[in-house]
Amino acid sequence: PCDCSESERLLGWVAGTGSLYKGQPAGSADDCCAMCTEDRTCVAWTYSPGEGSCWLKDNGAGGYSKRDRISGGCFSEVSPFPAYPLPDGVDVDHQSELEQLADEAAVYLLGRLAET
């Protein structure tokens, strides 16, 4: 099942790369998360408040930052980890949400610097 609480969302992030369906109309991130919960093949979701659209994902591979996006994952009962991958070195068990996001941003920026 999906954890639809606000604490389990990534703001400004597109989760996964494989959309199950073209963007579906949704009134809120809660609605988008509920749609993912109802679809057995959905492991992550991304909602655009500006577009009122929801993308259900069949994988959590990759992901990227994008304005006007809110994403979340569906959790299995045996794993507390989100369905979308976090950057290497981010330890979600021992960090606050703010520390985790700061680490993700640092890993992303270091990766971008390494590319130049």
Image (cartoon, rainbow, N blue to C red):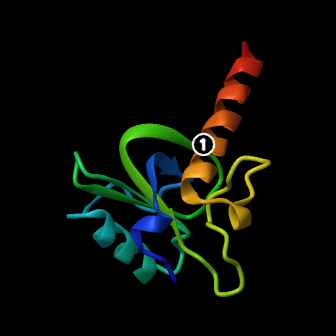
Horizontal and vertical percent position of residue 20: 47, 62
* Amino acid type, label 1: Ala
Q: Where is residue 22 in the image (x, y as percent from the top left)?
A: 36, 55
SS of the residue under disc 1: helix
Q: Single out the residue that lies furthest toward the bottom.
A: 77
Residue 61 horizontal side relative to residue 91, left or right: left
Q: Which residue is rendered at x = 67% and y = 55% of the image?
A: 85
Q: Which residue is drawn at 49% across and 77% down?
A: 2
The residue wearing badge 1 is 102
The residue positioned 75% from the left and 58% from the top of the image is: 91
- Indicate the quadrant containing the C terminus: top left, top right, bottom left or bottom right: top right
> How many numbered callouts?
1
Left or right, residue 23 beside residue 97:
left
Near mark 1 (Cα within 10 A), the count class, few <14, some 14-19 or many ≥20, is few
Taking the spot 66% from the left edge, 43% from the top edge, the residue there is 103
Q: Tell me where residue 66 appears, x and y as whole percent.
A: 43, 38
Residue 31's quadrant in the figure?
bottom left
Counting from the top left corner in percent of width and height, residue 95 is at: 67, 59
